[in-house]
Image (cartoon, rainbow, N blue to C red):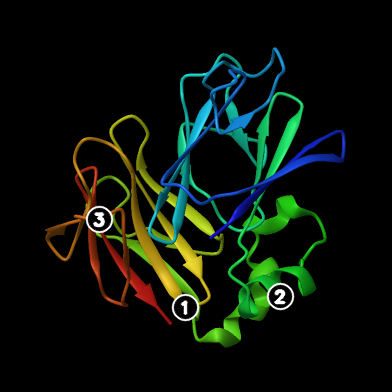
């Protein structure tokens, strides 16, 4: 499904395959991934596998969990994301094989892994059948605004209230619940699983705001 490559100062320390529904990471010896460093909390973060998706959640750690330089609470991992904990870097790699992984290796875009958020790093995947997409805000203070989905993962909503993400994949766009007691809805139906494939014209409701997903 995926693997984690743990490195310190550019030197790879260990590689861990993600095979369980929950994989814990921390300084204590009972974690699945043990990083014995004072910058790492005893129970620092947990990775949850939901179908083909892998989420990482910070467990209120002292020094926080970062993805590509940005502090996160819970986020869906995309191929080639770099998780940073203290001085340690943990690269998430999909090892499903096929065109997806090969494309990522052959077409790294701007060259740096952190550039994954740029649409250029996924340029070769456009031929795989997915075109550009946008989110049109229909209600609320931002009504009329359009957001182009250029990044691999775009998060929407209000942190601490309700947050969802739209992930760009070779097969299409996927809408996922990230945080909040109330789940977002697609075409008036609350999301029951962790994620759902989107179709052009789908109506999304999140944190009291209605949006429309438009592809092409």
Which disc is residue 193 wearing? 3
Image position, residue 9 (x, y; %): 87, 33
Q: Is residue 211 above or below residue 130?
A: above
Q: Is residue 9 above or below residue 102?
A: above
Gap between marks 2 and 3, in whole Å?
29 Å
Disc 3 element: loop
Disc 1 element: loop
**11 with respect to 178 (left or right):** right
Q: Residue at x 55, y 50 (%)?
A: 18
Disc 2 element: helix
Q: Is residue 9 above or below residue 41?
A: below
Image position, residue 194 (x, y; %): 30, 53
**59 with respect to 104 (left or right):** left
Mark 3 neighbour density, 10 Å: few (under 14) some (14–19) many (20 or more): few
Going from N to C along the chain, the mark reached first, 2 or 1, is: 2
User: Mark 2 highlights which residue?
Assistant: 102
Gap between marks 3 and 1, in whole Å?
19 Å
Image position, residue 142 (x, y; %): 32, 49
Going from N to C along the chain, the mark reached first, 2 or 3, is: 2
Of 127 and 138, nearer the camera is 127
Of 186 and 29, nearer the camera is 29
Mark 2 neighbour density, 10 Å: few (under 14) some (14–19) many (20 or more): few
Using the rendered view, name the quadrant where residue 119 is placed. Answer: bottom right
Of 68 and 210, nearer the camera is 68
Which disc is residue 171 wearing? 1
Of 21 and 153, nearer the camera is 21
Q: Is residue 94 above or below residue 70?
A: below
Callouts 2 and 1 close, C-beta under 8 Å: no
Gap between marks 2 and 1, in whole Å?
15 Å
């Amino acid at each position: 499904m995926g693997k984690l490559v743990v490195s310190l100062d550019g030197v790879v320390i260990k590689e861990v395959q993600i095979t369980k529904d929950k994989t814990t990471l921390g300084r204590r010896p009972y974690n699945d991934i043990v990083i014995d460093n004072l910058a790492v909390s005893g129970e620092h973060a947990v990775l949850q596998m939901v179908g083909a998706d892998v989420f990482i959640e910070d467990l209120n750690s002292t020094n926080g969990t970062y993805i590509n330089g940005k502090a996160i609470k819970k986020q869906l991992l995309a191929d080639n994301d770099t998780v940073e904990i203290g001085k340690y870097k943990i690269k998430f790699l999909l090892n499903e094989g096929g065109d997806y992984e090969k494309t990522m290796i052959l077409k790294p875009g701007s060259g740096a892994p952190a550039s994954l958020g740029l649409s250029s790093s996924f340029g070769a995947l456009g031929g795989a059948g997915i075109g550009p997409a946008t989110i049109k805000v229909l209600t609320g203070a931002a009504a009329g605004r359009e957001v182009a989905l250029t990044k691999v993962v775009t998060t929407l909503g209000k942190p601490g209230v309700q947050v969802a993400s739209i992930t760009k994949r070779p097969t299409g766009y996927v809408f996922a619940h990230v945080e909040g007691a109330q789940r977002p809805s697609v075409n008036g139906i609350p999301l029951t699983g962790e994620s759902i494939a989107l179709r052009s014209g789908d109506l999304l409701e999140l944190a009291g705001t209605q949006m429309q997903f438009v592809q092409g």
